[in-house]
Image (spheres, rainbow, N blue to C red):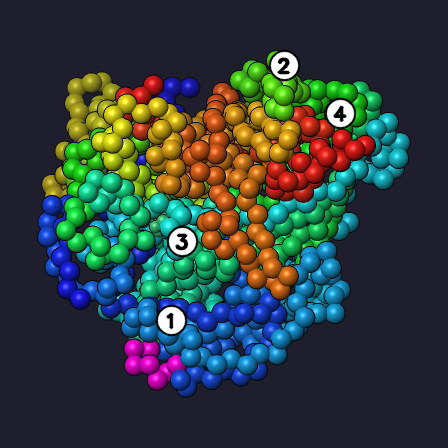
Amino acid sequence: MKIELHVNGKFYSLDTNPDAFLLDILRELGFTSVRRGCDTGSCGACSVLVDGKPVLSCCYLAVRAQNHEITTVEGLGEEADKITEYIINEGADQCGYCGPALVVTTYALKQEIPNPTEEQIKQYLVGNYCRCSGYEGQMRGIKKYLGVE
Amino acid sequence: MNFKEVKKSIPKVDGKGLLQGKPAYTDDFVDKNALRVKFLRSPHAFAKIRSIDLSRALEIEEVEVILTHNDVPRNPITRAGQGYPEPSPKDKFILDQYVRYVGDEVAIVAARTGEAAEKALDLIDVQYDVLEPVLDFEEAEGNSAVIHPEDKIYEMFPMGFDPKNNIACSYTDTMVVGNVDKKVEESDIVVKERYYTQAQQHTAMEPHCATAYLDYQDRLNIITSTQNPYHTRRIIGEALDKPLKEIRIIKPRIGGGFGGKQAIHCDIFAAIVTLKTGKPSRCFYSRKEVFENTFTRHPMRFDVTLGATKDGIIEAIDMQLLSNTGAYAEHALTTFMVAGSKVLPLYNKAENLRFEGKVVYTNTCPAGAYRGYGAIQGNFAMESAIKELADKIDMDPTELREKNCIKEGETSPVFKVMGEGTEGIPQTMESCKLDYCIKRGKELIGWYEKYPSKKIGKNKVRSVGNAISMQGSGIPLIDMGSAVLKLNDDGFFNLLVGATDLGTGSDTILAQIAAEALGIPVERVVVTSSDTDTTPFDVGAYASSTTFVTGNAARKAGLNMKEKILEAGAKALDAKSKDQVIFEDCKVNLKDGTKSITLEELSSGLYYGYAEDMQQLIASGSNTSPKSPPPFMSGFVEIELDLETGKYEVLNYVGVVDCGTPINPNLARIQVEGGILQGIGMASTENVVYSKKGKMLTNNLMNYKIPSRKDVGKITVEFAESYEPSGPFGAKSVGEIGIDTPPAAIANAVYNATGVRIKTLPITPQKVLKGIQKLNKE
Ligand code: FES
Ligand code: FES
């Protein structure tokens, strides 16, 4: 079927199966920041924003995303640079596979909860698994980005 | 020591691009038309294939090829991804008539779409003779069910390979020092305990994946998420009867490895499909396949006996080990040996030592390399037993450790006897701040205020626990790494290394080391790594080798390049010899200060201006070492435990580490923090569980629980001031050391909170509660 997606401010028309998931479609469109880490909606590596809210693109039907704003890290512009900078200054990016999803989710967190507590940050990001870093460095960077002590 | 480029936290060279989603990983480079590769896998734990009927599956139009054991070369290999001769038995064929665990590959299907490949899998008709499996590793030896009855499989050097008795390797009568039995008999205090460690899954976030294609020269190119491109090339060549010249392996960025990607998995299947069809192929494991069909950590059983004096001098240590390698024996011998060789030297005062045991086959998921590599298993057993000894003589366990542990300037006979698979090499600890690590860790955790435990409510107790550990820095005189530096016009350098950055940051720290040696800012270095066609040899990223082994190669390359620049600079400045010039601040200066030339001018002259003196400056360095200086760590945990439920929380984990000079303190710190968290996962929640028929039940991230960011309160890491003379600028490696201590430290803390000793990992609330109830009854 033909669908139209609005990704990072641009329209894309494509022909796809009705049961195709957003993850695969976004990757086909060249958004390599969207990554698969599991088959059960458990790892968070595929997170993108739909109307500003994080969703797991591996469980989100592409058709359902029509008429909504999809944002990947490629579409965050300077804000992505900022978040990235805080994380890499801590050395908290290891393999980086979980990274783009973490960046978009952190961005959404900032929009949604202006002055989060440490607990709120952990809760918001709890679905973003990272097997490399031990999370501590990520938290140090993200707290600095959010201006949280 | 005054450094400019090392001992300095700079961001990872690849960090920004990776976080912003730039194409970087294997699956970002797949040809749009690549064939999708899928597998028909055995539903049985042990069976012999009687027949396979492909006719209906082949009717599907998009299916390009289906391969069974009848269609692939039959060369025994090991997928371990180690050096050569391989210390793992060659007991694996690409496909075989026997299937030896649930999920073993039966057929490879390649189709133009994933759906067509899946459909074909359903239409393949396989008849099996189902055989009685061996699922319990304590019943494997001499079992009437023989897991590897086939011929042609072999060991490359004697390792006690005895497949007819389900024994992958055995090791006895070798690691014997003094007289353990006699000493134990004479000792005031004896501890004798049995411990079990479980299978653990690497769970790197990027699943195993590979893509293959033939290039315009008809060479087989494989882009793969591997930790060791050169071994992969060698093993694939061997399996497919292909000259290595015709194979190129490229490792792009890798989404985590931890030992799981040291092995050959997808790459060989993608390769064979491409060779058979001439078309590009793509193999991307599902998470379920990663769980069920790659490797786990070796589960082990330890019988530990300690003999000691009343005042806490450890006199005798005996470790008897049974290890389970699953269906194939990748890393069977070497993980087994590391369980002794990276544990026993911790207590080098003991003059009577013995370490023996066997590694057996079972019909379960094969085991392989995993960060910690035997040491974490041995550490749990030893450090639990040490705590038990401390309690028996009523001594603070940290003081018992301080009294008995290895110190700077000391050695252990174990280094000479035990290498990895073969004999080892004697070593004296030129850097060992383990005693400091214990002392500092106690301060950071507040040991004396908190040990052993404190009740903080009706049912809640807080307690602390400790364990110490060591690892290595590569394998002495087996691991080799190399580096090439090339000067470009505009005065920047390419650093080419075969070393594989898995997220560890090795590209970054190798650039820092080369820059330090050469005397230039690291910003002038562009790193290219891990391409068998364009980068020099490296064994790859395992055994905590890169910082130490390849680091020294990068240092040598830097020093060599500096010599060449001095020579070329001297000529450009009309000096008589390079002794009259110095290289400083990216300029070659005459020592008398009268003339100088910038690196930009010099490099431009070398490319375009110096007539017959024009040349490309290239310098290289290779390195192997008779040493493998161990990094050390002391780990401390504080937990809060609920006596009613047995549940506990890790409030704080403190790791004080001696890794020599941390080349990039931020990156070293994250390595340790990440290692600690994986260790906490192994200690507490991670466990591979099978059904009665040998089917893995923990095959997804819901049933196999890795730590999330809410599961641990705090991780605190510090480094000891330490300098390893044989390391690059004083460095040792740091990739594995973080993971080793949590299982024992947490078990010890649980004992301090409850009086319950958990001797079988993982330490679940159920086990703790059961122990508490039993104590209450007594
Ligand atoms: S891919 Fe793991 S949650 Fe989407
Ligand atoms: S950095 Fe590797 S999974 Fe997070």
Closer to viewer: mark 3 or mark 4: 3
**Residue behind mark 2:** B448
Q: Nearer the viewer, residue B766 or B639?
A: B766
**Residue behind mark 3:** A40
Alpha carbons under labels 3 and 4: distance apart: 45 Å
Mark found first going from the N terminus, 4 or 1:
1
- Residue B539 is situated, as x and y percent measured from the top left of the image, at 46, 50
- Residue numbers of the magenta segment: B57-63
Alpha carbons under labels 3 and 2: distance apart: 45 Å
Mark 2 vs ligand 2: CB below 8 Å: no
Alpha carbons under labels 4 and 1: distance apart: 58 Å
Task: Give the numbered dot on residue B118.
Answer: 1
User: What chain is tagged by disc 4?
Assistant: B
Secondary structure at badge 2 equals helix
Closer to viewer: mark 4 or mark 1: 1
| Residues at discs 3 and 1 both on one chain | no
Please determine whether, in this image, residue B441 is positioned above or below residue B24. above
User: What chain is tagged by disc 1?
Assistant: B
Mark found first going from the N terminus, 4 or 2:
4
**Residue behind mark 4:** B391
Q: Are marks 3 and 1 in contact (CB under 8 Å)?
A: no
Residue at 77%, 49% in the rendered image: B173
Q: Is residue B488 visible?
A: no
